[in-house]
Image (spheres, rainbow, N blue to C red):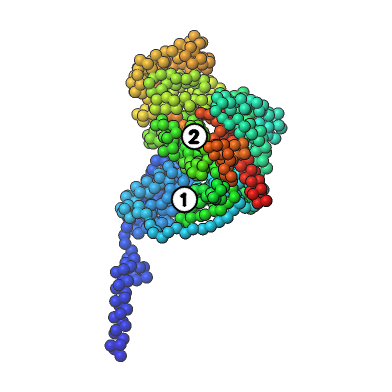
């Protein structure tokens, strides 16, 4: 009996020993966990899109307990999603080999770099945390069927899906990001000619005037039938958006900072609650119509039948599952290719600027080309205003924090501008015409300009505010104009207060000297040396500029000299900016029905392309009135939805 009892006890002991050797972290056996980190909370920062992203990470001895972003300044609507999702993924997977958020790459990367720093501080092994888990199993394939599939949940795609869902109960909307993050989320509003708001205010816009603006901007390089159709349908689009929950205000031209537009027709219907809320409301209306939405699901390629008709699309879910989605019509609205370095270099040469919406990499354009759609409008970019480079943002935030944004205040006013050769290159009074001046900066060496400030104007602003130099918003006193752009308020009441508030910029400028962005000199010659420009050419430019002001005639660029701001009293400052590109505006040839066309001008059955993926609205640059791009996106999307539903209906008969 003793031997019989001893044998099983020995076996049990042996099994326990094996388990301990194989699974040293088994808590049920009372074995201590491996110590991977020094317990505690650590803080670090990474460089985001618009400044520092500060992260706190709390560790136990064997795991990452929490990740928290305690400070960031990245654009609302872009950075927010990364701030929410990346920490969750790190803690859930106990790894920093997690996917970045599409469209929020800068913020995602900044968080990951900061967490890496915290891991080092805690004595952790980075190598084990950056190894990506692999799975050799082939992806699962799921087959779906809808009448209409829309790719892209920006303005064009959402409008297309919603319009289609009003006529068809089998519509799917695909979006590769985790929530809407396209240009429409950050835009200010859309144009129209004869909306109900314009009619009520007595401010309808002459359609011939609008058509002439497109003709002027394109010099004829446009699809005139498409342009005419979009103008004609623009008012209906605004009213339809309002009916579907999008709140809009009709505002006067120039209220958004473009003083050069003051007095132009009131085309802009501004977002009342911001672009993100507007798009989300439209998606809710789409869902109420029975529409289906799949986020974090990028489309990969179109499917065609043997006769050349579109029969569906292939997409991929976040878990790697491949979707074969059969459909009678597909609408592509993926926002252009401004975030694609390879395509930007191909179509714009070495002198290109990436678009502001980094996830827009030409997905829809490429898919349309692959099935025979004609290439059209690939040389159109939306250069608009100016900005600091990412490296300059890093240098400035290290010194000024988020106060560096105050250095953009100078860009709205007619200060002297010179390029890296020290040359004056434009009529400074047109600097607030952001379309034209953005293109002018793009054409300069290194796509760079310097704004030149003298001490006398800085003293004047410090004593009386910018309105004493040139008043931009006073005409709206007691006539408040309000809309949301970049999901932040544009409020003329607040702008009037700001413009009349004395602000001393000198301490800010002095603190930024040495960053490579702000330069100072007691004399013009010293300033030129510090800027790295030719002193003789620079001084010649300043002298010509000042002489034009004194004589009242600008023989160089024919500026209104009464508005120019003299450069006479030292010390002098220069602030460096670069060209800013919102994105591209073309790629696929379409007709007035928003159908994709082949090289012979024939429609590709069942394929529609809307918004920034579509070519034909513009020549080389963006049209110069307010709301043009967003207006085309919404109206082309709405028409694509209507026409695709009609196509599907006819195909069933």
Q: Residue 189, percent across and down?
A: 59, 35
Q: Residue 479, percent across and down?
A: 65, 28
In-front residue for pair 509/388: 388
Residue at image position (32%, 67%) is 24
Name, please, the residue furthest toward the front: 307
Residue at image position (35%, 59%) is 62
In-front residue for pair 645/252: 645
- Circle on res. 378: 2
Residue 212 in view: yes
Lateral position of residue 632 relative to residue 340, left or right: right
Quadrant where the N terminus sits is: bottom left
- Circle on res. 66: none
What secondary structure is found at the residue carrying circle 1? helix
Mark 1 — residue? 85
Q: In this rendering, is residue 438 above or below 639?
A: above
Lateral position of residue 50 relative to residue 597, left or right: left
What secondary structure is found at the residue carrying circle 2? loop
Name, please, the residue furthest toward the top: 551
Q: Residue 123, percent across and down?
A: 30, 53
N-terminal of the pair, mark 2 or mark 1, is 1
* Quadrant in the picture for residue 517: top left
Residue at image position (48%, 12%) is 555
Q: CA distance from mark 2 to mark 1?
A: 34 Å
* Quadrant in the picture for residue 184: top right
């Amino acid at each position: 009996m003793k031997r019989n009892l001893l044998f099983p006890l020995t076996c049990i002991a042996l099994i326990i020993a094996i388990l301990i050797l194989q699974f040293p972290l088994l808590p049920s056996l009372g074995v201590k966990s491996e110590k991977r980190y020094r317990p505690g909370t650590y803080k670090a920062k990474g460089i985001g899109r618009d400044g520092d992203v500060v992260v706190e990470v709390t560790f136990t001895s064997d795991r990452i307990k929490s990740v928290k972003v305690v400070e960031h300044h990245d654009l609302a609507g872009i950075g927010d999603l990364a701030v929410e999702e990346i920490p969750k993924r790190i803690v859930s997977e106990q790894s920093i080999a997690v996917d970045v958020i599409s469209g929020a790459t800068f913020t995602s990367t900044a968080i990951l770099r900061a967490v890496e720093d915290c891991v080092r501080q805690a004595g952790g092994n980075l190598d084990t945390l950056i190894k990506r888990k692999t799975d050799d199993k082939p992806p699962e394939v799921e087959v779906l069927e809808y009448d209409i599939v829309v790719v892209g949940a920006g303005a064009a795609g959402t409008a297309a899906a919603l319009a289609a869902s009003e006529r068809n109960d089998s519509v799917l909307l695909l979006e590769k990001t985790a929530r809407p993050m396209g240009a429409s989320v950050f835009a200010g509003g859309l144009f129209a000619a004869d909306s109900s708001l314009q009619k009520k205010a007595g401010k309808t816009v002459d359609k011939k005037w609008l058509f002439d603006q497109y003709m002027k901007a394109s010099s004829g390089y446009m699809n005139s039938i498409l342009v005419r159709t979009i103008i004609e349908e623009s008012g209906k689009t605004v009213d339809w958006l309002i009916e579907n929950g999008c709140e809009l205000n009709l505002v006067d031209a120039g209220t958004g900072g473009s003083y050069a537009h003051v007095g132009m027709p009131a085309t802009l219907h501004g977002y009342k609650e911001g672009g993100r809320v507007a798009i989300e409301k439209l998606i809710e209306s789409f869902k109420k119509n029975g529409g289906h939405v799949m986020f974090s699901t990028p489309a990969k390629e179109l499917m065609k039948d043997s006769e050349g008709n579109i029969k569906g699309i292939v997409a991929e879910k976040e878990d790697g599952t491949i979707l074969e989605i059969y459909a009678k019509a597909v609408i592509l609205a993926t926002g252009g290719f401004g975030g694609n370095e390879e395509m930007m270099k191909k179509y714009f040469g070495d002198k290109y600027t990436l678009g502001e919406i980094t996830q827009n990499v030409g997905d829809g354009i490429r898919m349309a080309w692959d099935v025979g759609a004609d290439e059209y409008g690939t040389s159109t970019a939306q250069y608009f205003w100016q900005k600091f480079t990412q490296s300059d943002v890093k240098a400035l935030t290290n010194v000024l924090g988020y106060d560096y944004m105050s250095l953009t205040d100078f860009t709205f006013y007619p200060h002297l501008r010179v390029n890296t050769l020290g040359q004056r290159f434009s009529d400074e009074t047109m600097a607030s015409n952001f379309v034209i001046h953005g293109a002018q900066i793009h054409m300069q060496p290194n796509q760079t300009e310097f704004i030149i400030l003298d001490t006398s104007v800085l003293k004047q602003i410090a004593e009386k505010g910018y309105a004493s130099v040139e008043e931009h918003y006073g005409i709206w006193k007691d006539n408040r104009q309000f809309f949301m752009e970049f999901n932040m308020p544009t409020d003329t009441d607040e702008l009037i207060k700001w413009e009349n508030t004395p602000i001393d910029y000198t301490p800010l400028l002095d603190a930024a000297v040495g960053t490579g962005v702000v330069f100072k000199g007691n004399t013009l010659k010293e300033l030129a040396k510090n800027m790295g420009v030719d002193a003789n050419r620079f001084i010649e430019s300043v002298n010509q500029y000042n002489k034009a002001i004194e004589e009242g005639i600008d023989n160089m660029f024919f500026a209104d000299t009464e508005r120019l701001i003299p450069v006479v009293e030292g010390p002098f400052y220069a602030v460096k900016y670069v060209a800013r590109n919102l994105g591209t505006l073309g790629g696929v040839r379409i007709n007035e029905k928003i159908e994709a066309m082949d090289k012979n001008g024939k429609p590709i059955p069942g394929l529609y392309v809307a918004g920034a993926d579509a070519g034909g609205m513009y020549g080389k640059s963006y049209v110069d009135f307010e709301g043009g791009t967003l207006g085309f996106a919404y109206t082309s999307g709405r028409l694509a939805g209507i026409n695709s539903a009609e196509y599907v209906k006819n195909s069933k008969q």
